[in-house]
Each structure stands twice: as structure tokens, then as C-alpha cells.
Image (cartoon, grey):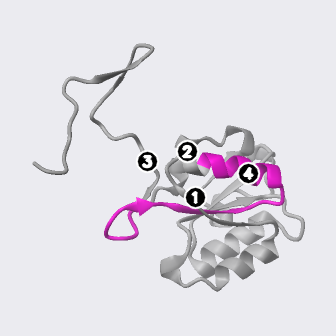
């Protein structure tokens, strides 16, 4: 069989860990016939968070699809993109400088049909609305955002 390789027996990776022949969980989009890495757009006014989340996106096996620092910039960037080229997930900070992130999430989800997740330094109980009421698929605290959580949010 060409192009196919399995590990038998498992290969040791050191420190008592073994590498199995099971593929690692990756951030994938089923929106196209051939799987591709899910593309994630970030809306947040903190450049430090955007840099940190970029690393998390890449660690999850996803692709950064761009960013905006405000609701207005996000709407301008995303509303002009044709549906096949739109990101698979948009992470929206609840507290943006020019508008409510929850209002932006609702507009992106309902008017553009985008998959949206809310992020914030606030606790979920302190959000101005529930994620579902904003059209979001979920919420994650900025401090708890990791590759597996991001991959789960991006999964269709």
C-alpha cells in the first residue's frame, strides 16, 4: 500500500510516552469535500490577546483567518466575504471599544450565517446575555482558551 504508514509496535517518544497510530485530534472543517484546517477570525481590541490566540489557533491545527480590533472593522471585513471564503469560526470579545460583542455576535450569526463563539475576561454568569441568545455556539474565558477547547468550538 503506497502512501499509508502505520506504527506497529508503538514508537517511544521518551519520558514514558508512546506515539500511537491514531491521528492527533485536529481542528478540521467538514464544510468542503476534502478536509482542510478550520479558519478562525478573531475580534478583540487587545493585541496581546490576539497574539496569544494566534498561537492557540495554530496549536489546534487551525488557520488564522484574520482579525479585527473593533465591531465596525469586523463587520466591514466579514460582510464583504463571499460565503465559501468565510471563516469557519469567529471568536468575538464581549467587550469591544465601539459596540457590544454580544450584538456583533448576533449580527454575524443571524445576518451572515457565521459560526461565532464569545470570549471574555468576564465569567459566563456576568455576560450581558447568554451565548445562545447571541447566536453563539459557546463561550470560553480568555484564561481557559486552549487548543482542545478551540478545536471543539470550531467543529461543525
For mark 4, what is the residue? 51
Query: For residue 107, which quarter of the picture?
Result: bottom right
Mark 1 or 2: in front is 2
Q: Mark 4 or 3 closer to N-term?
A: 3
Query: Is disc 2 placed on a helix, strand or loop?
Result: helix
For mark 1, what is the residue? 137
* Residue at 56% over, 69% down: 87
* Position in image of residue 33 (x %, y %): 31, 70
Query: Disc 1 to disc 3, how far (Cα)?
Result: 19 Å
Query: For residue 10, which quarter of the picture?
Result: top left
For mark 2, what is the residue? 59
10 Å crowding of disc 2: few (<14), some (14-19), many (20+): some
* Residue at 47% over, 52% down: 27
Query: Disc 4 to disc 1, how far (Cα)?
Result: 23 Å
Q: Does the magenta stretch include residue 36?
A: yes
Give the vertical position of 56 relative to 8 (above or below): below
Mark 2 or 3: in front is 2
Query: For residue 13, which quarter of the picture?
Result: top left
For mark 3, what is the residue? 26
Q: Is residue 91 magenta?
A: no
10 Å crowding of disc 4: few (<14), some (14-19), many (20+): few
* Position in image of residue 114 (x %, y %): 58, 72
Query: Disc 4 to disc 2, how far (Cα)?
Result: 13 Å
Amino acid at each position: 500500500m503506497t502512501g499509508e504508514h502505520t506504527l506497529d509496535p508503538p514508537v517511544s517518544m521518551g519520558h514514558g510516552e508512546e506515539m500511537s497510530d491514531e491521528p492527533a485530534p485536529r481542528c478540521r472543517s467538514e464544510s468542503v469535500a476534502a478536509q482542510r484546517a478550520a479558519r478562525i477570525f478573531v475580534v478583540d481590541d487587545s493585541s496581546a490577546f490576539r497574539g496569544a490566540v494566534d498561537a492557540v489557533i495554530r496549536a489546534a491545527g487551525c488557520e488564522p483567518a484574520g482579525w479585527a480590533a473593533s465591531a465596525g472593522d469586523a463587520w466591514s471585513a466579514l460582510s464583504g466575504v463571499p460565503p465559501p471564503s468565510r471563516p469557519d469560526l469567529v471568536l468575538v470579545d464581549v467587550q469591544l471599544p465601539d459596540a457590544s460583542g454580544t450584538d456583533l455576535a448576533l449580527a454575524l450569526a443571524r445576518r451572515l450565517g457565521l459560526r461565532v463563539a464569545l470570549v471574555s475576561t468576564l465569567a459566563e454568569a456576568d455576560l450581558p446575555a447568554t451565548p445562545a441568545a447571541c447566536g453563539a455556539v459557546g463561550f470560553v474565558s480568555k484564561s481557559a482558551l486552549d487548543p482542545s477547547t478551540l478545536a471543539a468550538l470550531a467543529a461543525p
